[in-house]
Image (tube, rainbow, N blue to C red):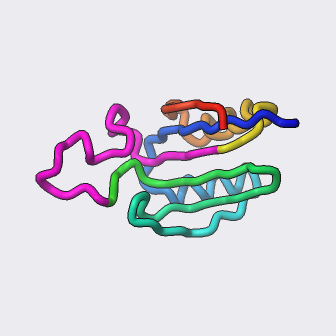
Amino acid sequence: MSIFVHKVFGLIASDADSIARALDDALDLAFVPHESSYLGEYLLHEGADGFKVAVSSNMDPMYLPGDPEEEMYFHPDFPQHSVLISVTVSESVEPHINDVVSAIDSHMVVISRDAA
């Protein structure tokens, strides 16, 4: 039985689409566009055995001028990281995902890592 982790990477990038294309090129993933009032527009790949990758903006689409500034981003400690990659992956594949994301953006940060 595989142990899964949920990991969020922050990337300094111009847009989520270019990051999804780079992930598709590196990992052969098919992303499907989605939209929600909470996340806004995002791209999602759902693979076999619980493997998921979502690419989205760090900007909260519900933020309005006049709201507290710390509510502008999903991860306010990382405002310079405009694109988020959220991954649910088995621990055995995690090092490969880390290498791929690092190759896409050498300035990436791991924002969080939790048991899935």
Residue at the left extreme, as displayed:
66
Which image quarter holds the C terminus? Answer: top right
Q: Residue at x 70, y 64 (%)?
A: 30
Count of numbered circles in the view: 0
Which image quarter holds the N terminus? Answer: top right
Q: Position of residue 20 (x, y in %)?
A: 59, 56
Q: Residue at x 72, y 41 (%)?
A: 89
Q: Is residue 98 left or right of residue 33?
A: right
Magenta stretch holds residue 73: yes
Where, by quadrant of the figure, is residue 77 drawn?
A: top left
Q: Which residues are magenta?
A: 62-87
Q: Position of residue 99 (x, y in %)?
A: 69, 33
In the picture shown, does residue 78 fall above or below 14? above
Q: Position of residue 48 (x, y in %)?
A: 81, 55
Q: Is residue 75 left or right of residue 106?
A: left
In the picture shown, does residue 98 fall above or below 87? above
Q: Residue at x 61, y 60 (%)?
A: 44
Q: Position of residue 26 (x, y in %)?
A: 72, 49
Q: Main secondary structure of the magenta part?
A: loop
Which of 44/101 is in front? 44
Where, by quadrant of the figure, is residue 98 drawn?
A: top right
Where, by quadrant of the figure, is residue 113 drawn?
A: top right
